[in-house]
Amino acid sequence: MMNEVIDWGQSISTGARPSNGRILVVDDHPQIRRVLRTALVANSYEVDDARDGDEALNKVYEERYDVILLDCNMPGMLGMEVCRAVRAFSDAGIIMLTVRNSELDKVRALDSGANDYVTKPFSTPELLARIRALLRRNGSERSVERLKLGHVEVDFETRHVAVRGTRVHLTPKEFKFLQYLADRPNRIVSHRELLRAVWGPEYGEELDYVRTLVKQLRKKIEAQPAQPQHVLTHPWVGYELRVL
């Protein structure tokens, strides 16, 4: 099975180096997960893995990944179903891994939200090159500069926020929280991801911090804070900036 998936080719050995990114490997075969983990860790990626779609979704809810390597054919939830579900709340790069090589399968994978498609067997250098290319593309995407939400206008360059033409002061964390969601409009962002993005990588369980911030932010930008139209709560999961 290992030879069917990966040709080690010119695997690169490394010493201790900074992480190149966080990757989630989703495959129902333990041996494939081990092989991919070994190759990725050797190239300075932080690696987590999941054996099926349900486990993968739980991990993506809780953690932020730069790239997800997602097997297309798994028992239970198929890879394309997982891909569509992930795309509802995450902007992680997704590379589908499959033994199929038809144009229709590639179209279906991309339509499901995948960024790239790799056919088995593939070599380690090819997979690493595709990961690097995806990380470059995602890293080069510019953050949103201006946002208009009904009566709310935000200029992220000047940090100017106005409600019905009147300037409103946001704290640094409120502004960072709003900008993080604005870069991911209409997607659910998990509590843990927001904590790490706004408060720092050492945070992840302090849900009251997020709830308190959201309550104060809604008072400043929502017409009816008790019935928000823009900063929406998804119980037990996270928050979404609804941009209509």
Image (cartoon, helix red, strand yellow):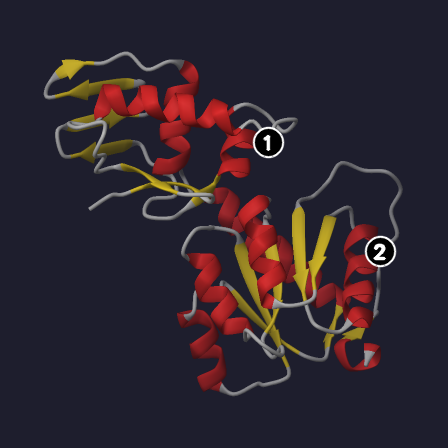
Pointer 2 with pointer 1, Cβ within 8 A: no
Task: Tell me the number on the disc at residue 12.
Answer: 2
Depth check, front residue: 151 or 239: 239
Question: Can residue 93 be seen from the camera position used here?
Answer: yes
Tell me: 145 left or right of 113. Answer: left
Q: Position of residue 3 (x, y in %)?
A: 83, 80
Q: Position of residue 189 (x, y in %)?
A: 45, 43
Amino acid of disc 2: Ile
Local packing at callout 1 (Cα closer than 10 Å; few below 14, some 14-19, many 20+) is few
Question: Can residue 157 be seen from the camera position used here?
Answer: no
- Residue at 49% across, 63% down: 115
Amino acid of disc 1: Glu
- Residue at 15% across, 27% down: 223
| Element on which disc 2 rests | loop
| Element on which disc 1 rests | loop
- Disc 1 designates what residue? 205
